[in-house]
Image (tube, rainbow, N blue to C red):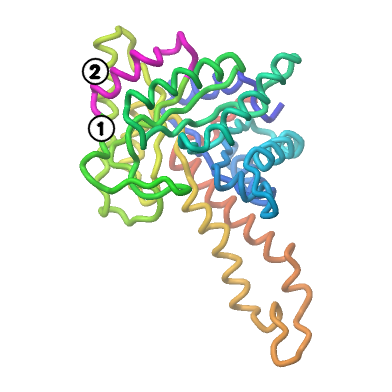
Amino acid sequence: MPIATPEVYNEMLDRAKAGKFAYPAINVTSSQTLHAALRGFAEANSDGIIQISTGGAEFLGGQHNKDMVTGAVALAEFAHIVAAKYDINIALHTDHCPKDKLDGYVRPLLEISAERVARGENPLFQSHMWDGSAETLADNLAIGQELLAKAAAANIILEVEITPTGGEEDGVSHEINDELYTTVEDAVRTAEALGLGEKGRYLLAASFGNVHGVYKPGNVVLRPELLKDLQAGVAEKFGKASPFDFVFHGGSGSTQEEIATALENGVVKMNLDTDTQYAFTRPVADHMFKNYDGVLKVDGEVGKKSTYDPRTWGKLAEAGMAKRVVEACEALRSAGTHVK
């Protein structure tokens, strides 16, 4: 089953941790970007993670009522059908969800999966993210405890962001400053509240200078070596080596050296959105500029149907995004790691 079962997803993450590689987590906003992500993973012979943010889910829900749960469920159900044609394993994940959107997004989705599991089925999503980075760490972890218990009961992995990532993501923004670095104390408090697996598995989005959005190399000071300090500090206190499965947020513009250091220190998932958005849109812009008199009815002419047919430029967009996904798999060392 290409949509990973809970057992397969856990195995995927374990193999990434042991092999020091990570899965690209690709944000999608439509059936077409879903296919682009699936195609990229398949062409790279890599398992992968496909995720839907609150804004993406709202968009998928349609502009008539903009219902996030409807959008997320619809795409997940679609993914369960079409992913069966791809010879790879895919985990479905929901991206950043702040406190004010929990009741309209993650909590209802957890309930849907709990009902599926009660019927003997697999959960609809394999993991969900709680983004409490705008809250105090105490409040963040308290909500994290509640959500982790619900997720574990539904065979779902929780992702938590304990300290701010700079920039803006779906309306949640943080300044780019010296507070973008998680401390060992933060990590210890996280382990005390959420455990180290005995209360349920979770992925940890720690901050090491990450910034969401677009930036050039050198504009942001990333310190992926900090992740090693967090692993060591918690390992010393709790006696468990390399205790965390880390997530790399805000990776656009990162150097290959920075990515390699993050992988060596326990990163198993890296989010990609900005780069894949551009890779999807760039071929469309190229097509429109080159064929403006075909896609537009200029000076009373009739245009050219074959150029404005959405399938024409849509195929170009899919290919462009798929290529960027392949590049991500190669950079994160997941290419060629799919085990049949």
The disc, 1 or 2, on the residue closer to the chain's N-terminal end is: 1
The residue labelled by disc 1 is 225
Whether 71 is drawn above or below 23: the answer is below
Q: Which residues are magenta?
A: 183-201
Q: Secondary structure at mark 2?
A: helix
Position in image of residue 53 (x %, y %): 54, 42
Q: Residue at x 51, y 58 (%)?
A: 278
Amino acid identity at mark 1: Glu
Q: Residue 92 in the image: state x and y as whole percent.
A: 61, 33
- Hey, which residue is sitting farthest left in the picture? 178
Q: Nearer the viewer, residue 108 or 303?
A: 108
Is 239 contained in the magenta span? Answer: no
* Residue 34: mark: none
**Horizontal side of residue 317 vs 16, given as left or right:** right
Q: Residue at x 53, y 22 (%)?
A: 157
Q: Choose mark 1 or mark 2, whichever is in front.
A: 2
Q: Is residue 46 visible?
A: no
Can you identify the residue that label 2 sits on? 233
On the image, which quarter does residue 246 sit in? top left
